[in-house]
Image: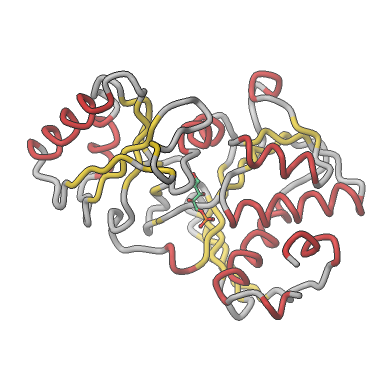
Amino acid sequence: MTGDLSPIDKAKFVAAKRAVDFVEDGMRVGLGTGSTAAWMVRCLGEMVREDGLKIRGVPTSTRTAALAREVGIEVISLDEARWLDLTIDGADEFDADLNLIKGGGGALLQEKIVATASDQMIVIADVGKEVESLGAFPLPIEVIPFGWQTSKALVEDMLISMDVLGRSVTLRMNGDSPFVTDEGNHILDLHLNRIGNARQLAMVLNQVPGVVENGLFIDICDIVIVGYGDGRVETRDINEGTVETDRLDFIESENLFADLD
Ligand SMILES: O=C(CO)[C@H](O)[C@H](O)COP(=O)(O)O
């Protein structure tokens, strides 16, 4: 089955596979959202079912919650967990300081709360997500539906005053209707090309009335695990300043790949 995976999917898989080595018995683990995080949830599920790993997972979306339950992971709420040992999640972009753009899947609000409530955040990504400067990927912000057009106009004014490049702002759609997040909100995508001062932008965006959260994750991620299509994985630890390189096999597993057939 793994022979059918594209190089990007193989890269996502090996990053996820390497990341679950960080998970230990008894941990409360934040479970990210997206296709890379889904591999991680499947790998953890296999460890729970076959190796007896005992963990409790806090999902960052209804999608991830459904998958976690399906693969046998005990799911608890963040309020039950209170604090997490580790969160593993994907990203849309990461830079050399391990700052991120997230929210391509629309789950940025829960993802940021869960990651911030964790001792450690590990990001898993294929090498295509690495950038010199954040901003080529449209930056998602979550806004409440009430007066979203006003919030959009205020964000546009703010981008002009900050002289941020690009500046077009679009409402994310799901077919003919606005996309609705798990929290019942909408997403505005900021097409900026290049962000410049991401730290400042992250703070200023959250001052706009109606904006709930933005997809810039600054100083939240501790480790990024970068996967390559040929099975190579690099584990970059920003706190330790280390880079470890490994090569993983694409392990054939009926259980892991069954739902992809
Ligand atoms: O932030 C996210 C969801 O809100 C995802 O982690 C991000 O979009 C990456 O997704 P994928 O692993 O499918 O490329």
Can residue 77 be seen here? The reply is yes
Here the colouring is secondary structure
Q: Position of residue 35 (x, y in %)?
A: 59, 56
Q: Is residue 121 left or right of residue 161?
A: right
Could you tell me which residue is drawn at 54 percent across and 65 percent down? Answer: 226
Q: Is residue 170 left or right of residue 26?
A: left
Quarter of the image where the C terminus is located: bottom right
Q: Position of residue 85 (x, y in %)?
A: 67, 36
Could you tell me which residue is drawn at 40 percent across and 41 percent down? Answer: 217
Could you tell me which residue is drawn at 61 percent across and 41 percent down? Answer: 87
Q: Is residue 67 left or right of residue 130?
A: right
Please tell me how many numbered marks the rendered image carries: 0
- As rendered, which of 247 and 65 lies closer to the eye? 65
Q: Position of residue 100 (x, y in %)?
A: 40, 49
- As rendered, which of 67 and 121 lies closer to the eye? 67
Quarter of the image where the N terminus is located: bottom right
Could you tell me which residue is drawn at 72 percent across and 63 percent down? Answer: 260
Q: Going by the picture, which residue comes out furthest to the front?
A: 176
Can residue 218 be seen here? The reply is no
Using the rendered view, name the quadrant where residue 120 is placed: top right
Q: Position of residue 252 (x, y in %)?
A: 81, 73
Using the rendered view, name the quadrant where residue 131 is placed: bottom left
Q: Is residue 206 left or right of residue 175?
A: left
Position above or below: 218 against 17: above
